[in-house]
Image (cartoon, rainbow, N blue to C red):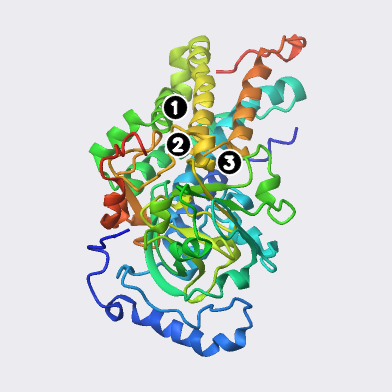
Amino acid sequence: MKTRGFPVWAVYALGFVPAVVAFGGGLAGTTGPDPIRALEQTLGLWALRFLLAALCVTPLRRFFGVNLLRYRRALGLLCFYYASLHLLAFIGLDHSFDWAEITREILKRPYAFIGMACLLLLIPLAATSTNAMIKRLGAKNWTRLHRLVYPAALLAAAHFIFAVKSWPLEPLLYAGAALALLLVRLAPKRRPSFEQPHKA
Amino acid sequence: MLIRVGTDRPVASSDITPRSLWLRRREFLAAGAGLGLGLAGFGARAATSPYSTDEKPNSRADITSYNNFYEFGTDKSDPAAKAGRLKTKPWTLRIDGLVEKPADYALEDFLKPFSMEERIYRMRCVEGWSMVIPWLGFPLAEAIKRAQPQAGAKYVAFETLVRPEEMPGQRSFPKIIPWPYREGLRLDEAMHPLTLLATGLYGEPLPNQNGAPLRLVVPWKYGFKGIKSIVRMTLVAEQPKTSWNMIAPDEYGFYANVNPGVDHPRWSQATERRIGEGGLFAKRRPTLMFNGYESVASLYSGMDLRANY
């Protein structure tokens, strides 16, 4: 695998391009008649994409021998940053910091509640993403805690489905991908040689 | 039927139509004869209307690029991108059911007797956004009167064209809507003077993505009631099936009157975002009962609008 040459910082740099483009485009008025909705949806979609990308790392290693482990933290954090910006756009742009309305929406609307629950699950994962925290928790506890990404993936996919009318294909494809990435982890481990201990 | 129109027509029409728009219309008048639109009565006799709002219409670009028309895809940019292949000539409109004069009309023949008016209406989408659109059309009531409804007719059912080879959304999987798209109105709603059959906007024929060549506009109801590219109108005795109600009856009712007090089960209807206003930092505005067309309230007196959403 020729991953060594590609630096982790470049993943972050590239990862923020969609956000910069969406925000810049929104300011410039090139993202269509409803720039707020466009920005909100772009941020949410990329949060989901980075989440799924992070979930690809283990199966890629296990079934295809492709080791992208050194990028997983960047992918996970990008997911968290995008999800946070997505919420910020919802609060600040979509609802102009009308806290009463925002609270009501989050508590009352399934799509908003599910999305919020998803982000809450991501917070401890982002907070324990540093080497120091991994050391402090110990590899075993850290791994156990980070299994929260599995329910987070399901909630993210559900959030997308609940936010749209009828049953268009796109959210269903993302939900299918999330489900597949979780199910593939249940496959019996036939090739124990790939079971390397997690490096702290 | 006596219909009182209160707040909807407070001023002279000359005060209502923005000058720029009026000028555009004159331009069109001058050019009209040479355009060869094939739509009799189109444009040349367009008049402004006391039913128009004096709010600033959205740009033509906004109105024609941000559409929900699932026959062409679920993304709001799909209709503008994919509706070009739809052939709207020739077009046949069937009027049938409980009428004395059922007929299959060539659209030109159907339109001939009616004079077009410009109606600038607010349009509130069920998704929580709104626009102001200068339609060109004529009251649906006139078309219904010509067909001579029988005594038993209580509702009007509408159907959109089904032509998957020209409408990619109708080929999509999973099936978004059980085609054809269906809508309906109670007869008194259909006869209300605000209810419009539109053939144009901004003084020009409807672009395909906006429902060419003939669409319904009911400004006090959510936008999905405004069925597009109509091929059939049927007068019936029983409340007809309507598409969104068939897909999700708990979310979309038959009436679908704009009502800030009755939320969509999955989002609030209390506020809306006016498209084209304020860019990335636009503030929501409160949604008005019946989208501000209060004169229709009498149609629903005694009805529980929470139950009949």
Residue drawn at the location 39% of the way across and 26% of the way down: A120
Visible residue check, residue B283: no
> From mark 1 to mark 3, how far is it between C-alphas?
23 Å
State which quarter of the image contains the C terminus of chain B: top left
Query: Residue A15 or B142: which is nearer the viewer?
Result: B142
Residue A198 higher or lower than B74, as above or below: above
> From mark 1 to mark 2, how far is it between C-alphas?
9 Å
Residue B262 higher or lower than B141, as above or below: above
Q: Are marks 3 and 2 in contact (CB under 8 Å)?
A: no
Count of numbered badges drawn on the protein: 3
Q: Which mark is residue A118?
A: 1
Q: Amino acid at mark 1?
A: Cys
Residue drawn at the location 26% of the way across and 55% of the way down: B294
The residue wearing badge 2 is: A83
> From mark 3 to mark 2, how far is it between C-alphas?
17 Å
State which chain disc 2 sits on. A
Q: Are marks 1 and 2 in contact (CB under 8 Å)?
A: yes
| Disc 3 element | helix
* Percent x, y of residue B257: 36, 47
Residue drawn at the location 31% of the way across and 50% of the way down: B299
Q: Amino acid at mark 3?
A: Val
| Disc 1 element | helix
Q: Amino acid at mark 2?
A: Ala
Q: Within 10 angstroms of label 2, few (less than 14), some, or many (20 or more) residues?
A: many
The residue wearing badge 3 is: A11
Q: Which mark is residue A26?
A: none
Query: Residue B136 or A29: which is nearer the viewer?
Result: B136
Query: Residue A153 or A55: which is nearer the viewer?
Result: A153
